[in-house]
Image (spheres, rainbow, N blue to C red):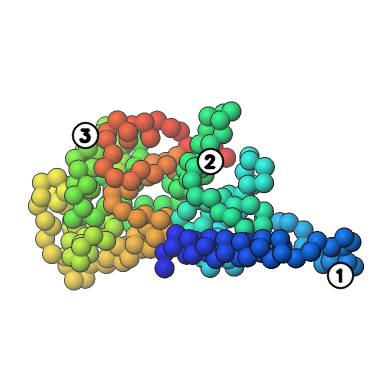
Amino acid sequence: MTTLRKISAALFFSGSLACGAALAQSAAPTPAVQTDAASQQQSSEEPFTLEGLRKKLIGRLGTNVSEVSETAFPGLYEAIVGPDILYTDKNADFLIMGQLFDTKTQRNLTAETKDRLNKIDFSALPLDDAIKVVQGNGSRKIAVFSDPYCTYCKKLEATLKDMNDVTIYTFLYPVIRANSREQSEAIWCAKDRGAAWRAQMVEGKAAAPKDPKCDTSALDRNIDLGGRLQVTGTPTVFVPNGQRAPGAVSLEYLEKMLAVEPKKN
């Protein structure tokens, strides 16, 4: 069951419980004086914590909730549920799916969270597992996850070859076809990986079959890396400031991405 289906089911169940509780409360007489037992129960309740709210959400939704934080809206909390950004109250009784805007500052708070979650530490990328192509003085850097049979990857490669003063690190990410792995291995094991990659993507010339002795374990590491970075499609571009861009983005967009300097700690 997908995350959203689980959440929908949980919302229906929670709503049913809330309706039942409301009916039962309206039918029962209101006590004039609070009993000692009720007082003791209230006093024994655990104080509110973000971690407690996170655990309560996990229990009710039956899925991973990696993070819960306060928002600028009083009483509203942001929850990272799988790949989704949701909002809830302090009791985890309700969930809101949508965008949270700050009208005073004209900021999309949901989009800011998404950008933060999608950013990576570019300096931590294992660049030795990527195909390296230097253009001009190579002073700027771009990392790309690509599949040799990806149509949009070929479109992006045609754009990348026209960029000036850039070093392009291509992580072969064979996920589209069953034979993507075989072709990726052939390119990785070529004498000139960069030339073999460009020939495949720009000129449509497939690389020769690999030497059986060639080590292709880098491709396994790339698959694992892409999973950890939540690369869900090809091509996906990363730049040194940690920003990502999925799809065959334009040259102008790439230049804007590269113009944003990485933040210094």
Sequence order check, earlier mark of 1 and 3: 1
Q: Residue, x 27% and y 56% (percent of image)? A: 172
The quarter of the image holding the N terminus is bottom left
Sequence order check, earlier mark of 2 and 3: 2
Query: Of circles 1 and 3, which is in front?
Result: 1
* Residue situated in front as seen by the camera: 78 or 187: 78
* Residue situated in front as seen by the camera: 62 or 184: 62
Amino acid under label 1? Ala
Query: Of circles 1 and 2, which is in front?
Result: 1
Above or below: residue 76 compared with residue 183: above
The residue that mark 2 highlights is: 100
* Residue situated in front as seen by the camera: 54 or 60: 60
Residue 229 image position (x, y, % from top left): 42, 55
Q: Is residue 204 left or right of residue 75?
A: left
The residue that mark 3 highlights is: 162
The residue that mark 1 highlights is: 37
Residue 125 image position (x, y, % from top left): 41, 52
Amino acid under label 3? Asp
Q: Residue, x 38% and y 63% (percent of image)? A: 224
Amino acid under label 2? Leu
- Identify the secondary structure beneath mark 2: loop
Residue 181 appearing in the image: yes
Q: Is residue 144 left or right of residue 152?
A: right
State the separation of the CA atoms marked 1 and 2.
Answer: 41 Å
* Residue situated in front as seen by the camera: 134 or 43: 43
- Identify the secondary structure beneath mark 3: loop
